[in-house]
Image (cartoon, rainbow, N blue to C red):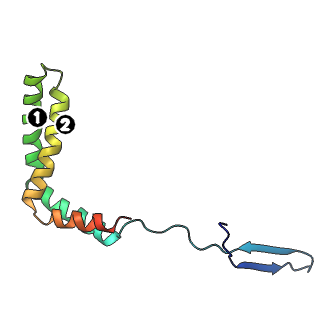
Amino acid sequence: MDDALYPVAASVGADGRSLTVTPEFPSLLHPVYSPAAYENLVTQIQIGWQNGGSVTGSIGAGIGAAVGCVLFLFVGCIPGAALGAAIGVVNGVVSANPAVTPAAFEFLRTLP
């Protein structure tokens, strides 16, 4: 494969008339991120969520819905609420736990 040489395991059958050849490939699967950095990021996000991220998400959804309804005449209520909730959650989680940002950058540095 790709002009590379790989070892082969061979075994002769019990009757002495058959040969089983099995190539031994190196593992093609490898982790694409650091599990420790991912666990740290998830833990920090959970701490931020429990310390007030959910409240700011709700506030952001309300503000986003109000702005979307006013600016886009009721067509933008739901998209505004979704966008406001997303911005509110990110803002609230990071404000409630400042360790989220370094954990996020630590995780991003482990990606290939």
Which residue of the protein is positioned furthest toward the front in this rendering?
Answer: 3
Residue located at (37% from left, 66% from top) = 33
What is the number of callouts on the image?
Answer: 2
Which quarter shows the N terminus?
bottom right
Residue located at (25% from left, 62% from top) = 42
User: Element under label 1?
Assistant: helix
Drawn side of residue 10 relative to residue 31, left or right:
right
What amino acid type is highlighted by mark number 2? Ala
The circle on residue 82 is 2
Q: Is residue 29 above or below residue 94?
A: below
Per the image, the residue denoted by label 1 is: 64
User: Element under label 2?
Assistant: helix
Drawn side of residue 89 relative to residue 109, left or right:
left
**Are the two marked residues, 2 and 1, in contact with CB atoms closer than 8 angstroms?**
yes
- Mark positioned earlier in the residue sequence (2 or 1): 1
Q: Is residue 112 above or below residue 22?
A: above
Give the CA separation, mark 2 to mark 1: 7 Å
The x, y position of residue 7, in whole percent, is: 70, 79
Residue located at (8% from left, 29% from top) = 67
Towards the viewer: 78 or 49: 78
What amino acid type is highlighted by mark number 1? Gly
The x, y position of residue 104, in whole percent, is: 22, 63
Q: Is residue 31 above or below residue 62?
A: below
Q: Quadrant of residue 17?
A: bottom right
Towards the viewer: 73 or 39: 73
The x, y position of residue 14, in whole percent, is: 87, 80
Q: Residues within 10 Å of mark 2 (few under 14, many from 20)?
A: some
The circle on residue 35 is none
The x, y position of residue 81, in whole percent, is: 15, 34
Which quarter shows the C terminus?
bottom left
